[in-house]
Image (cartoon, rainbow, N blue to C red):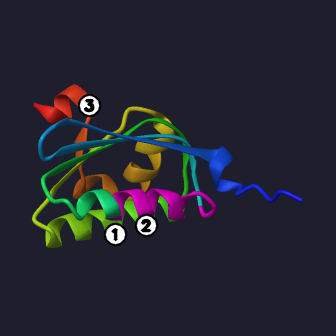
Amino acid sequence: MTVQDPRAEQIELKVRQPAPGVTVLAVSGEVDMVSAPSLREALVNGLGDGGTFVVDMTGVTFLGSAGLAVLVEAAKLAQQQSATLKVVATARAVTRPLEATGLGEIFNLHDSVDSALS
């Protein structure tokens, strides 16, 4: 019997390094209490390297409270690591929860990855 991790179907994470000291994490799918641990792991691992870390959330279709908590934790970790955390958010599924909770104010928000990298 094979048991599949349900998180694998909800979220897709792709990491790339377009330049030395710069990491881009593209997130797509649903970020909720089931998939948030996968996002957290990717953020913690990436932020440990320092430098600039861009979280591209343009492919996110749902951002729940667990996902928001992971982003807040990442912002705190970035500050401790002297890293720069930037969030790319254009979809209402991401911008609405950030605005409704007031958390949009604590993130360095951008409309595109190019904008975040410039």
State the extent of the magenta-drawn residues as a range.
33-44
- Quarter of the image for residue 80 reads bottom left
Work out whether residue 66 or residue 93 is closer to the camera in this orientation and state it.
66
Q: Which residue in the protein does label 1 denote?
A: 73
Give yes or no for contact between labels 2 and 3 (Cβ–Cβ under 8 Å).
no
* Secondary-structure class at tag 2: helix
Helix, strand or loop for disc 1: helix
Image quadrant for the C terminus?
Answer: top left
**For the point 15% across and 67% down, which residue is it?**
79
Q: Residue at x 25, y 60 (%)?
A: 47
Residue 22 sits above or below residue 42 on the image: above
Residue 49 image point, x, y percent: 19, 59
Q: Nearer the viewer, mark 2 or mark 3?
A: 3
Q: Tell me the kind of residue under disc 2.
A: Ala
10 Å crowding of disc 1: few (<14), some (14-19), many (20+)? some
Q: Is residue 88 visible?
A: yes
Q: Which mark is residue 59?
A: none
Discs 1, 2 touching: Cβ within 8 Å:
yes
Q: Residue at x 24, y 69 (%)?
A: 77
Residue 74 spot, x, y in % from top left: 31, 64
**Label 3 CA crowd tier, 10 Å (few <14, some 14–19, many 20+):** some
The mark found on residue 113 in the picture is 3
Real-space Cα separation, disc 2 to disc 3, in angstroms: 22 Å
- Per the image, the residue denoted by label 2 is 69
Q: Residues within 10 Å of mark 2 (few under 14, many from 20)?
A: some
Q: How many badges with numbers are in the image? A: 3
Q: Quadrant of the N terminus?
A: bottom right
Q: Amino acid at mark 3?
A: Val
Left or right of 99 in this view: 8: right
**Among the two numbered marks 2 and 3 on one chain, the one whose residue lies closer to the N terminus:** 2
Mark 3: which secondary structure? helix
